[in-house]
Amino acid sequence: MGNGPAPKMTIPQIVEMKSAGRKISMMTAYDVAFARLVDAAGHGHDPVGDSLGMVMLGYPTTVPVTMDDMIRHASAVSRGAEHAVLVGDMPFGSYQTGRDDAIRNASRFLKEAGMDAVKLEGGHEVVETVRALVENGIAVMGHVGLTPQRVAQFGGFKVQARSADAARQLIDDCVALERAGCFAIVIESVPAAVAALATERVGIPTIGIGAGPDCDGQVLVLHDVLGLFGDFKPKFAKRYADLGPVIVDALRQYDREVKGGTFPDAEHSFSMKDAERAALERALAEPLRPKKVS
Ligand code: KIV
């Protein structure tokens, strides 16, 4: 057997990784170029996060992101990723207004953007919505802890579930989301011990972001990992490369070469046959012949 392209991952395969004790690594993607690179790196699972509002569109939070923003970016990702399970993040306002809106908007992710599943934020308060989506054939990933769409209620991007009561609520929410049919749950910015206890109590994979090492998988925001989002770096995000300065250097070199006349050189220009060029010069030496208008 040759080394053909890796087959497309499936949601049941992701779920089985928990019982097989295999860690799941997910990376966000927002456009076709990075979706190809994330896919090539072997991440079996790409969420198209509404974090794109901050890292791609320059909003201070994810709240202003619309369904149309999400569909445009998610469909670009699905044109780039061949291997990963793709999850479209339901933006603020797309599922809070009722079951029918949630089903209609989630369906857009599957029909228009080529997503395999959707993700939505919240615990017990979204359980009925999750159930309705799952009953209608839409795979759902949950998201608890620091749910960024509620950043104003939290008073900022703050670690959640630090008290015993709040931690108990978060664990109960994870169990309720599993019972409602979620196939996995993102747990964001909570103490590692709380995420570990939640992970023990559910049969579906937990995916941590700022939730310690004991979740079944991890996810990070691509721009944090690659150093593409200025100097801000959340405590939990490890910067695996610092591409910002590399990109600025490349762009400065281009600027210098254009201004210095060394780009484009012969290698980056198109040539013309000598005979055609000589004929052109002869033609240009003759007086201008106005084109006949018929
Ligand atoms: O918006 C986002 O990028 C997310 C990821 C953490 C999955 O929710």
Image (cartoon, rainbow, N blue to C red):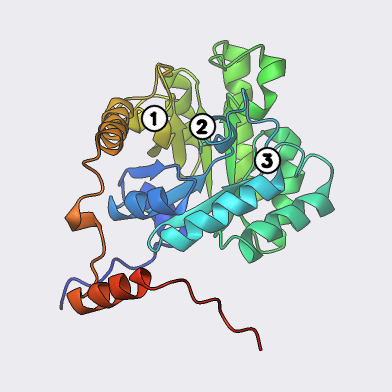
Q: Which residue is mark 2?
A: 55
Q: Nearer the viewer, mark 3 or mark 2?
A: 2
Amino acid type of disc 2?
Val
Expressed as whole percent of the image width and height from the top left, the position of residue 47 reads 49, 46
Quadrant location, the C terminus:
bottom right
Report if the CB atoms under discs 3 and 2 are less than 8 Å apart. Answer: no
The residue nearer to you, when weighing 120 against 192, is: 120
Amino acid type of disc 1?
Leu
Name the N-terminal-most of marks 3 and 2: 2
Q: Which residue is mark 3?
A: 91
Circle 3 — which element? loop
Above or below residue 170? Residue 81 is below
Measuring 62% from the left and 30% from the top, which residue is drawn there? 172
Separation (CA) of disc 3 from disc 2: 15 Å
Amino acid type of disc 3?
Pro
Q: Is residue 160 left or right of residue 206?
A: right
Q: Is residue 98 left or right of residue 234?
A: right
Report if the CB atoms under discs 1 and 2 are less than 8 Å apart. Answer: yes
Separation (CA) of disc 1 from disc 3: 23 Å
Q: Nearer the viewer, mark 1 or mark 3?
A: 1
Q: Please tell me how crowded label 2 is: few (under 14), some (14-19), or many (20+) other residues with Cα within 10 Å.
A: many
Measuring 66% from the left and 11% from the top, which residue is drawn there? 155
Above or below residue 213? Residue 233 is above
